[in-house]
Amino acid sequence: MSHPQCVGREAPGIWGLASGVGQWVPGSAGYQSSGLGRHFLAALPTAAIGTIALSVMAFSGRPFFNWICPRCAYTAISRKFTPAMNDSEQAPLIHEEGEVGFVEYQDFVYKEPFKFVSGGSLPGLTLRYETYGHLNTAKDNAILICHALSGDHHCAGVHGIEERKQGWWNFMVGPGKPIDTTRYFVICTNVLGGCQGSTGPGSINPETGKPYNLDFPKLTVKDMVKAQSLLIDSLGIDRLHAVIGGSMGGMQTMQWVIDFPERVGRYIALACGARHTAQAIAFNDTGRQAIISDPAWQQGHYDPEHGPDQGLAVARMMAHITYLSDVGMQSKFGRKRRVADESKEHFEVEFEVESYLRYQGASFVTRFDANAYLYLTKALDRFDLHSPKSLDATLSGVTAPGLVVGFTSDWLYPPQGNREIVEALLRLGKHATYAELAMDFGHDSFLVRSPQLYELIHRFLTR
Amino acid sequence: MSHPQCVGREAPGIWGLASGVGQWVPGSAGYQSSGLGRHFLAALPTAAIGTIALSVMAFSGRPFFNWICPRCAYTAISRKFTPAMNDSEQAPLIHEEGEVGFVEYQDFVYKEPFKFVSGGSLPGLTLRYETYGHLNTAKDNAILICHALSGDHHCAGVHGIEERKQGWWNFMVGPGKPIDTTRYFVICTNVLGGCQGSTGPGSINPETGKPYNLDFPKLTVKDMVKAQSLLIDSLGIDRLHAVIGGSMGGMQTMQWVIDFPERVGRYIALACGARHTAQAIAFNDTGRQAIISDPAWQQGHYDPEHGPDQGLAVARMMAHITYLSDVGMQSKFGRKRRVADESKEHFEVEFEVESYLRYQGASFVTRFDANAYLYLTKALDRFDLHSPKSLDATLSGVTAPGLVVGFTSDWLYPPQGNREIVEALLRLGKHATYAELAMDFGHDSFLVRSPQLYELIHRFLTR
């Protein structure tokens, strides 16, 4: 059996997973190959395949095979070994899912002045975005996906054979997936203030020829959403079928239905809240201090090639802990050691969890701008649906039906913070649903494959 | 009415709490002055008094007056306004408590080689310590108090009129207090590896004339306890009436009853656990990375006057969040702002909680050595009562009856980690009690005034 993207490109190949994982042959005991087709696994270096599988194994704690066809980016997933988060999640919804395949980003360039809530302004702006699926003639099948703090516009597919990294929500977006690209036209854009192609602190100010850095206006979630609305205008879309997002993306989602109630058909906000707790602000400010106190920050005027990498890495390490859960970390790492004890103290990696976190910090600085991190965390800290009057007052104009999802192990944006949004909406007589999923992956639960979450999103979008 | 230490030193004075708190006059409505006596409040600068009261008010969320007599260090506490943590804690145990008053530290100098678990050794060592109360002729009334990571030997009283800061457990230790110095001889020592007078990484290596820095041997809690046992030897004490400690002090306490079962009469371990979780290790390593990646660290060979202050401050800010609780921080700070919004981004203090944490970071570097922080956090991460065989095997030789206390809001060393110690002890047929206190102060709950905790400790010591 083939999948659409790869028709005519099939060739005999070898299925195999090498060192550390064992041989994996289609049709062999324990493996069901339906829906996979035959692809060039041989074209992938064996070590890389082993790594892909192993990394997923480490995360799920169970064998799980995930392979991308180098021709069409089709992802092979073993049915038998889907990663089980909870015993109740043993019945995957998706069987014959496909992939959006190769994707390219586009840049929306807005040449008019853009005014921020703070009063500051930009002479114009660019939003980098990707789309998947096709906009229908009625232009009423568009879904906007909003990304989290460290996310970007690349939420599904792969950019090319050389860059096989899948979009951050690839398992959620594609043909036959919960956000079904055979049905919907999906848009995902890097936020204003970001650093993945959209205008942010690191962008060149056309009026000075230099980066904005701290001259970039004070940023809010409302500004991000306003910029997105200009992109949606440019696509000729009056009304979105839905807006969806998790974490900072959930805040954008809420801001959309508050600021543009007539333009949103329905919405799903995941792992978010009406505002940051003192603890969340405290963690963010500690991360900011790590960056700002790095001498390389230079009051924000660093050379992009020599930014405050050390400070940003520490900020990311700390933040990353807050995205996981105690139980999840214990199950994934426990007290596993990397090296034998030595009598001399050295402060190099000793425990597995240290290695993991240091890697997270080091890799983050290769893809993220420190000033953008400062601005975005500030936007999160300032987001407050209880202000200026009350949560009920802020939500009073919402018209679309909504789904808000909290995760039991999320201690950064705890379930209660999600629930109170729905409680307010219900008090106001709105159509709103709150769902709480029992998962051990902490705040990042919405980024983890979960048949329960698939089911929730799929059903809410199509009901 | 007077208290013992100040007899004959009384003089008329003015009672008052100035700006921000309002006037406070003994005998006036709402205040009960019994047990206070008349002292020289006038000798204290008004602003300082206001600050003392205000800081406690902010913490407890209720008015609370705490004043130290500059003559004898007697602490005045308003009965009516004792800080209530929970409604169930409205009945303070202590009425006519006194103070240990002025105290002086002493240095125990051990001139023999000291060998570490790691195999490393020191040619000798110094432990700085304080004692309160009197050792009886039978030498069987000594209590050893073990401090937490950032604590020291100064756990009660004040050092002088110029340095009015009370010891870190002053409310717990003193005449008539739960650890009653009219009855017990109390010893508290700065740990080996510390930086408050005991030998640590910052101490001068007599063989080189330079600081040990990273030549200091790899440190464990077992080493700390072994060094303490030498001090106890030097005082001529065979057997301690009790060993008590919270957090890292709780780990030392457990190590005492494991390594020296015949020398401990009873023990109380608070807010600790049998070993660090992956999350606790992750936070510690992130703090260490903040220090190590500060260019001023210089591979540990920094000038003590110009150490990695920025990194250490960030490490402390982060750690401090883990010592509190979400609920506690929300109640104390919420989203209170310090400054009005401005259109320009600056990353200065905006929220109260940022101000508080930055202050915690900045003040910590004035009293703590970065290398000591690295060594002590490593000792904590490596502490593991499940190793080398099992928790039960490690605890099998314990003979003393013990009390272990967990705190409901402690997410750094969660209640379960405390409880499992007692569960193991009970499985082994030992005398052990587990108590769990419902307090909102997180891991730091054991450092907060709580009649429930007073009661537990008082009764366990005297039963």
Image (spheres, coloured by chain):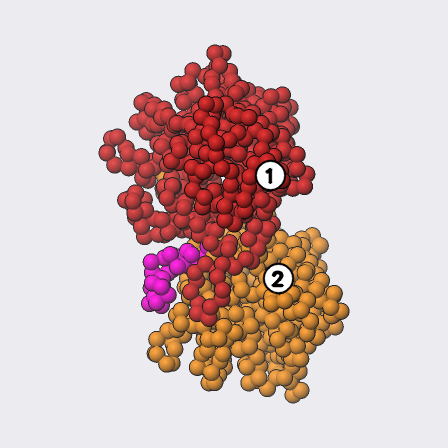
Chain colours: A red, B orange
Q: Which residue is mark 1?
A: A28
Q: Furthest residue to the top?
A: A137
Placement of the C terminus of chain B among the 4 image quadrants:
bottom right
Residue A213 is labelled as none
**Over which residues does the magenta segment extend?**
B286-313
Q: Amino acid at mark 1?
A: Ser
Circle 1 SS class: loop
Q: Furthest residue to the right?
A: B429
C-alpha separation, residue under disc 2 versus residue under disc 1 = 47 Å
Q: Which residue is mark 2?
A: B273
Circle 2 SS class: loop
Q: Residues within 10 Å of mark 2 (few under 14, many from 20)?
A: many
Q: Nearer the viewer, residue B286 or A26?
A: A26
- Count of marks placed on residues: 2
Q: Residue A61: x and y, percent? A: 59, 47
Q: Nearer the viewer, residue A357 or A256?
A: A357
> As displayed, is residue A237 above or below residue B79?
above
Residue A407 forms part of the magenta stretch? no
Report the side of B58 relative to B34 (left or right).
left
Residue B289 forms part of the magenta stretch? yes
Q: Nearer the viewer, residue A86 or B399?
A: A86
Quadrant of the image occupied by residue A118: top left
